Image (cartoon, rainbow, N blue to C red):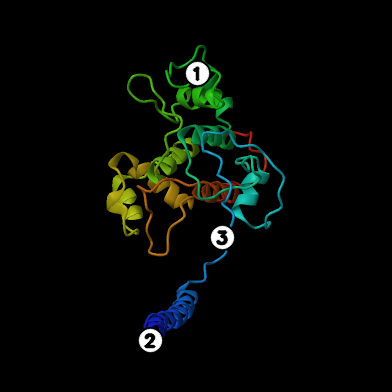
Amino acid sequence: MGSLRNTLFVLIPLLAYGATSKVSTVILGSLQVQAQPVLPALSPSPAPLPPNSIPPQIKPASPAPNDAVSKVVAAGLMNYLTDGQFHPELFISRAELASILVRTFGLAQRSAASQAGTVEVQDVPLSYWASKDIQTVLKTGIMKGYRGNMFFPNQKVTRAEALAIFAQAYGVFQFPDNTVEEILSQYSDAASIPAWARKSLATSLNAGFVNIDTQNNINPLQPMTRADMAYALSQYLASSNRTNTQTPAK
């Protein structure tokens, strides 16, 4: 009898513990299931964009006929990149700017471009994809090098730089200083335009080559994008009514 009492004394707590453990396990398992968040499905990673240093390649596409991109591509002034996209958000490099200006304004046909010899630029070997165009803009004075005979072909350009150089190739209007300031004063951030670019940028603004944001800002110190350049080129094409881009601007 004593032995039976001792056995029950041991079994009852163990049975109670087992029942409690099962209930606890069920409750905890339920809580764990409810607490787990539902994760969204992962999208595949996009393919990397082609770097600006790769020379653009023409690839057929059919964007809207009134689109600035379609106009400048059709005119041969800019191209789609190697993946078949235009990538308007990419920045324009100095080498790309040189190449675009040579094609747009027929700079290779100007007399200065045919002078003998080459302009020494240590960071642009003759094998570089834009070497010939860089020589052309240097010989014609449309673009300048840096100290130490450097061109920095892969360096991005600001909107002030690109649009001022664009005006140099187009032909800077010889506005008096007060007219230049009157033109620039219409824009909210005109004070941030570098002094050296003010006259040339006034030409681009007056000719309608500059895309302005909704706050009437020029954003002169922001990098020049391919979209910005496409806008300038499309406006130039519209103003000159040219389809043959090999004719130098007057």
Q: Residue at x 48, y 76 (%)?
A: 29
Distance between mark 2 and mark 1 Cα atoms: 101 Å
Amino acid type for the residue under numbered disc 2? Arg
Q: Which sits earlier in the primary sequence, circle 2 or circle 3?
A: 2
Q: Residue at x 56, y 52 (%)?
A: 45
Task: Work out whether 205 lies above or below 98.
Answer: below
Q: Which residue is mark 3?
A: 42
- Furthest residue toward front: 1
Q: Which mark is residue 125?
A: 1
Q: Which residue is mark 2?
A: 5
- Furthest residue toward top: 117
Q: Residue at x 52, y 67 (%)?
A: 39
Quarter in which the N terminus is drawn: bottom left
171 relative to 78 in the view: left or right: left
In contact (CB < 8 Å): disc 1 and disc 3 = no
Circle 2: element type: helix
